[in-house]
Image: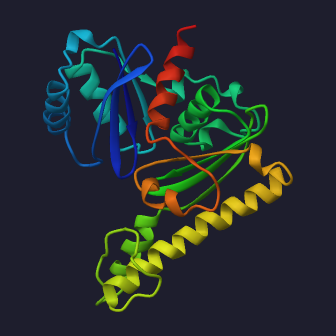
Amino acid sequence: MIVVIDIGNSNICIGGYINDELSFDFRLNSESNATVDEYSSIILAHLLDNNVSIDSIEAVVISSVVLLITPTIVEFTRKHLKKEPYLVKDIFPYKMIPNIADPSYIGTDIVSDIVGVKTKYSTPAIVVDMGTASTFNVLSDEGDFIGCIIVPGVQLFSEQLHNTTSLLPNVPISVPTQVLGTDTVTSIRSGVYYGYLDLINGLLSRILKDKFEGCESKVSIIFTGGLSVVFINDINYPVIYEPYLTLHGLKYIYDMSKI
């Protein structure tokens, strides 16, 4: 079994692969102040629930965009999984993705998404990964990286509205029942949802016009990330929902490192 760990700003996603099949997955909150033992109590319990024995783990692969958490999870894998983990930043051959000006300035989550698309879907492609930040990663016909757009995630939009006002509540992200709200909560829900939906559709339209005008129908548009499922039914273009894209990419990166 290959265990893959994606450390994001809000969540840590963990999955296990037997051959090329995802056997299990779970997520936990990213806590910068948590200790190795605190993380171990949660992760080991999940592994036990999924009938995973430590002896069955062949390797551990980690992608992280949270530098404060990385050493803690690395130490967890050494202490409790008895493995020296593979870090994407150390094992990925960046020459595989042309047009990256400086590999140290591209997140390993983006790298994992790109690899996941190149190995599982057709290109050209636009990958929309909705997490704490939302990224729009664009691949050419040949699967080369063209560029990326990064915007604040939808949860940040909602939380910032609450945090910088004295009376407005923090409203969970969900699809409104109508465009116009009739009270504070429904008005915020509508504003956040439709405002962010128009941001997504607007950026997709700009990317398609700028890079793929005249052949838009050939572009695979792939949505991943925790909150993407909330929006996919209202996107103006056909989309593929792939919740495990980053984990798939991590598994393929490990496979490439062993060739």
Q: Eyeballing the image, is 252 above or below 229? A: above
255 and 80: which is toward the camera? 255
Q: Eyeballing the image, is 21 above or below 199? A: above
What colouring method underlies this structural image? rainbow
Is residue 217 visible in the rendered image? The answer is: yes
The total number of labels drawn is 0
Please provide percent x and percent y for residue 2.
Answer: 37, 17
Please provide percent x and percent y for residue 69.
Answer: 33, 41
Tell me if 107 is positioned left or right of 181 in this view. Answer: right
Task: Classify the position of the C terminus by image quarter.
Answer: top right
Q: Eyeballing the image, is 232 above or below 250? A: below
Residue at left offset 32%, top offset 28%: 74
On the image, which quarter does residue 35 sit in?
A: top left
Tell me if 211 is positioned left or right of 103 in this view. Answer: right
Please provide percent x and percent y for residue 174.
Answer: 37, 68
252 and 208: which is toward the camera? 208
Is residue 131 visible in the rendered image? The answer is: no
Residue at left offset 52%, top offset 22%: 252
Please provide percent x and percent y for residue 41.
Answer: 13, 34
Tell me if 94 is positioned left or right of 216 in this view. Answer: left
Q: Eyeballing the image, is 216 above or below 247? A: below
Residue at left offset 33%, top offset 91%: 183
Tell me if 182 is positioned left or right of 110 in this view. Answer: left
Task: Classify the position of the N terminus by image quarter.
Answer: top left
178 and 38: which is toward the camera? 178
